[in-house]
Image: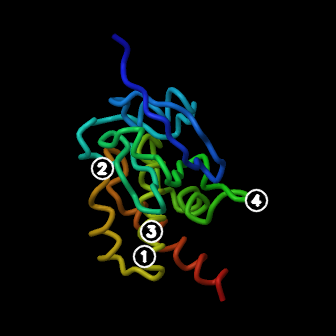
Amino acid sequence: MGEELVSIQFHVNGEPYQTQVKAQELLIDFIRDRLALTGTKRSCDMEICGTCTVLLDGKAVSSCSLFAFELDGKGLTTIEGLEGPDGLHPLQKAFIRCGGFQCGFCTPGMILLAKSLLAENPDPTREEICAYMDANICRCTGYQMIVESILHAAKEMQAANR
């Protein structure tokens, strides 16, 4: 007896897709193994660390805790889709400029969670950033440079929108 397949249609980083997924296939496995988008990292597999964070219809989610079929009718953004026609996203630039990473393992999830934050609150305080980013764990940086990176990106993005 074969494993049940589910047909889905969705967008990944702005590109339309239509495929079949196994009913029990996790979103993180689909992203990494089937789409070959390896910027999304696997770590805890329990929705605790935030390393596997992606954006689903613009909202930050843990890809280790969702099934791939939940993509149906939705838009998925991974770190690979953040770069625009003019180059790196302001958050990516800020993480580089401000040293918001060390080993880089958590960085894709951090940047995508920060993007979700700035979409909700374009001018967050340091305290609001700390509270929002509390969902993601970094074992290297001590978080100060991550917060600085987000503050810097927020200012850059506000200036660009004026």
Give the structural element (helix, strand or loop) at label 2. Answer: loop
Labels 1 and 2: the sequence-earlier one: 1
Q: Which residue is mark 2?
A: 137
Q: Amino acid at mark 3?
A: Glu
Q: Residue furthest bottom?
A: 162
Q: Which mark is on residue 120?
A: 1
Query: From mark 1 to mark 4, how far is it between C-alphas?
Result: 23 Å
Query: From mark 4 to mark 3, how far is it between C-alphas?
Result: 25 Å
Residue lying at 31% horizontally and 53% vertically, measured from the top left:
136
Q: Amino acid at mark 2?
A: Ile
Labels 4 and 2: the sequence-earlier one: 4
Q: Amino acid at mark 1?
A: Glu
Q: Residues within 10 Å of mark 4 (few under 14, many from 20)?
A: few
Q: Which mark is on residue 148?
A: 3
Labels 1 and 4: the sequence-earlier one: 4
Badge nearest the viewer, 4 or 3 = 4
Q: Residues within 10 Å of mark 1 (few under 14, many from 20)?
A: few
Give the structural element (helix, strand or loop) at label 3. Answer: helix
Q: Residues within 10 Å of mark 3 (few under 14, many from 20)?
A: some
Query: From mark 4 to mark 2, how far is it between C-alphas?
Result: 30 Å
**Quadrant hosting residue 66:** top left
- Quadrant location, the N terminus: top left
Q: Nearer the viewer, residue 69 or 146?
A: 69
Query: From mark 1 to mark 2, how far is it between C-alphas?
Result: 21 Å
Q: Residues within 10 Å of mark 2 (few under 14, many from 20)?
A: some
